[in-house]
Amino acid sequence: MAILLFLIAGLAEIGGGYLVWLWLKEARPLWFGLVGSLVLVAYGVIPTFQSFPSFGRVYAAYGGVFIVLAVLWGWLVDRKAPDVYDWVGAAVCIAGVAIMLWAPRGAA
């Protein structure tokens, strides 16, 4: 469930930001900006459904997921193919996310 929530949050942040970008940078209609803004508000709510108790840990881990999603978005939507360094960097981020979220921790 955690991974699904990270993916949904990432798509909401990137998708909402992309709609606002299109509105402001590419002169799309106002409704692009309005819908994008609503999607960004949803992005702010989605992470609260995570079961992890620490806000900072959830958002730090989400950052790694966001990086991977942003690379994929650039490739699939903007048609900018990632290079080997993009993929290696994304893999390092995902490894960091796994360590942060699922490393065994003692009671503290």
Image: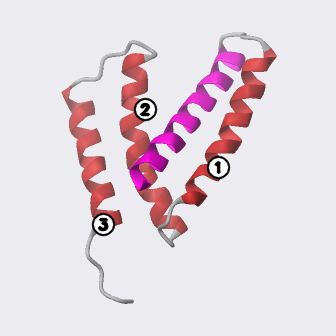
Q: Is residue 53 magenta?
A: no
Q: Which residue lies under the disc numbered 1?
A: 44
Sequence order check, earlier mark of 3 and 1: 1
Residue drawn at (45%, 15%) of the image: 78
Rendered location of residue 11, percent (x, y): 51, 35
- Provide the secondary structure element on which disc 2 rests: helix
Mark 3 and mark 1: span between their CA atoms? 23 Å
Which circle, 1 or 2, is nearer the viewer? 1
Q: Which residues are magenta?
A: 1-25
The amino acid beneath tag 1 is Gly
Q: Main secondary structure of the magenta part?
A: helix
Q: Residues within 10 Å of mark 3 (few under 14, many from 20)?
A: few
The amino acid beneath tag 3 is Trp
Q: Which residue lies under the disc numbered 3?
A: 102
Q: Name the quarter where the C terminus is drawn.
A: bottom left
Q: Nearer the viewer, residue 45 or 56?
A: 45
- Provide the secondary structure element on which disc 3 rests: helix
Q: Horizontal placement of 8 versus 29: left or right?
A: left
Q: Is residue 3 magenta?
A: yes
Q: Name the quarter where the N terminus is drawn.
A: bottom left
When the figure is inspected, residue 30 is found, relative to residue 99, above or below; the finding is above
Q: Horizontal placement of 38 versus 90: left or right?
A: right
Residue drawn at (68%, 25%) of the image: 20
- Provide the secondary structure element on which disc 1 rests: helix
Rendered location of residue 79, percent (x, y): 39, 12
Mark 1 and mark 2: span between their CA atoms? 17 Å
Residue 70's disc is: 2
